[in-house]
Image (cartoon, rainbow, N blue to C red):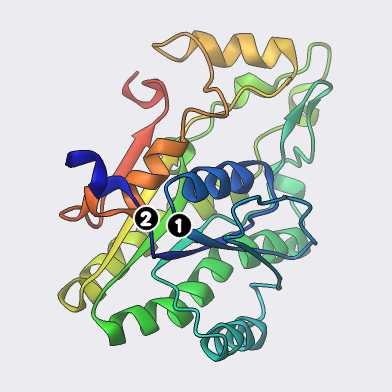
Amino acid sequence: MTTDRFRLDGRTVLVTGGAGFLGRQWVAALLDAGATVISVDRVASTVGDPSGRLVHEQVDITDPHAVADLAERLSSANRQVDVLVNNAALDAPVSASGLSGGERFETFSVDRWYAEIAVGLTGAFICSQTFGSLMAERGRGVVVNIGSDLGLVGPDQRLYRVDGRPDDEQPVKPVTYSVIKTGLIGLTRYLATYWGHRGVRSNVLCLGGVARDQNPTFMARVSERIPLGRMACSDEYGEAIVFLCSNASSYMTGACLVLDGGRTVW
């Protein structure tokens, strides 16, 4: 049956940033599809798992030695990573009170640049290098990078404006977000051509924003720029990650799967 190609029974999927908001969505969807999931994060996870197929690992993915140690521990436990989901990121979210961490480009600190690039891009490189190499040795595997519509288009800074503030004090989406999400598209294409002949596929999921009690003004502004007229619900991306991790996408590599409500077509 066609639906059988979406199943992940017998496969192990490693998800970085598994304790975060989107990470928890990926973990739940993958468990539902039958996978064993290794949730990796710098913080301890409180996510439960009645299936017994969820493993929590507290690891700093910006440290190559820590990632290598994780790979060695998994190998010693006879756990083989079949799919890698590079999800970890440090973001500047929009909350009910507006955009947090909206540091303007002119004053954006180098320390913050290094820290956010380290998690969102360097961490994806390290994990892909470590676990993707093992996949290539076995002749099969999948890498899925979690991107964004802002990897395809520039951020519309008007979304974050605060009435009454001068232009040079307006909050903006940080430069690192665009750089990281654009970089993940490049990493995806590189891995697809580098390891394609060795049975390793690589794709990127470019997402739009998820509604989660953000500032009402922001949500209204975003929705006006989306053909479907709304932001995504938190449960609308799970099937997409299963598709990319499973045999249902067996002839797909180097591609951007865009789920943004049509925002980038305007």
Q: Can residue 146 be seen at all in this image of the molecule?
A: yes
Q: Amino acid at mark 1?
A: Ala
Query: What residue appears at the point 67 percent right and 16 percent down from the top-left corner?
Result: 218
Q: Identify which residue, 214 or 142, lies in the foreground.
A: 142
Q: Quadrant of residue 3?
A: top left
Q: Quadrant of residue 173?
A: top right
Label 2 crowd bin: few (<14), some (14–19), many (20+), radius 10 Å: many
Query: What residue appears at the point 80 percent right and 29 percent down from the top-left corner?
Result: 169
Q: Earlier in the sequence, mark 1 or mark 2?
A: 2
Q: Amino acid at mark 2?
A: Leu
Q: Is residue 266 above or below residue 146?
A: above
- SS of the residue under disc 1: loop
Q: Identify which residue, 187 or 145, lies in the foreground.
A: 145
Say which quadrant the C terminus sits in: top left
Q: Position of residue 10 (x, y in %)?
A: 39, 65
Circle 2 residue: 8
Label for residue 35?
1
Q: Identify which residue, 171 or 240, lies in the foreground.
A: 240
Q: Position of residue 5 (x, y in %)?
A: 24, 48
Label for residue 51?
none
CB atoms at circles 1 and 2 under 8 Å apart?
Answer: yes
Side (left or right) of 206 relative to 176: left
Side (left or right) of 9 relative to 112: left
